[in-house]
Image: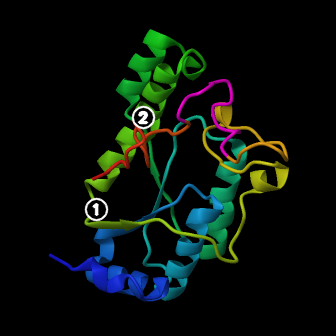
Amino acid sequence: MTDFSKFEAVPASEILSWAIETYGGSFAIASSLQKEGMAILDMASRIAPGQVRVFTLDTGRLPDETYQMIETVRKRYGIDFEMVFPAREEVERMVTGHGPNLFYSSPQARLLCCDVRKVRPLARKLRTLRAWATGRENDVPVHPLYARGYTSIGCQPCTRAVGPEEHERAGRWWWEEDAKKECGIHFAADGSVTRNA
């Protein structure tokens, strides 16, 4: 088993080089095309042009600007995004039983929608990989919704711009009061860190 503690003081570019060389096609970068994920995509594409796998979760409810951003990144970096979709049967069952906009009805319904559209597809994708990465900011293409006041970008109906005095997460599931505003990919409903894979 690899001792990853040796990478704590190593520059990100060296870690990426090691991961690409060590895992090859079993390594991929997860990107939602937000600022946080674009830096690692940019760095990896410079390290191994044309060899980097990148995937994104397509929930079926993304803003048009996200699809435009995918095209911008495809053209700039020559990357074919691997689009990861929710299981059709699970979406059909959920929408049939709860309606297309179930996320407005309760935090539990919203968490079900996030679980079906994001968490489960991510878990399925990660089971096909030996290693994956996400990243932080660099001078890379910026999603156009940031210029319109968005501080977090997710599915179109669940995300809005925030005001100058609002918390950065205020634009996510704003109709919910006193609820933990996470989808389940990074943090579970109880606030614990989610371990995908």
Magenta region includes residue 139: no
Q: Position of residue 48 (x, y in %)?
A: 46, 85
User: Considering only vertical position in the picture, is 84 above or below 120?
Assistant: below
Numbered disc 2: secondary structure: loop
Foreground residue, 113 or 52?
Answer: 113
For disc 1, the marked residue is 129
Q: Return the residue nearer the eye: 63 or 190.
A: 190
Q: Is residue 128 left or right of residue 106?
A: left
Q: Residues within 10 Å of mark 2 (few under 14, many from 20)?
A: some
Residue bearing the label numbered 2: 189
**Residue 106, horizontal then vertical, whole percent:** 54, 17
Position above or below: 180 against 20: above
Name the image quarter holding the N terminus. bottom left
Label 1 Cα neighbours within 10 Å, binned few <14 / some 14-19 / many ≥20: some
In the rendered structure, which amino acid carries the disc numbered 1? Leu
- First in sequence: mark 1 or mark 2? 1
In the rendered image, which quarter is residue 82 located in?
Answer: bottom left
Residue 59 point in image, percent of width and height: 52, 38
Q: Quadrant of residue 51?
A: bottom left
Looking at the picture, how far across and down is residue 61, in whole percent? 59, 35
Residue 144 is at least partly visible in this image: yes
For badge 2, the amino acid type reads: Ala
> Does 152 sit left or right of 193 as displayed?
right
The mark found on residue 48 in the picture is: none
Magenta range is 169-180
Q: Is residue 166 above or below residue 44?
A: above
Q: Is residue 21 visible?
A: no
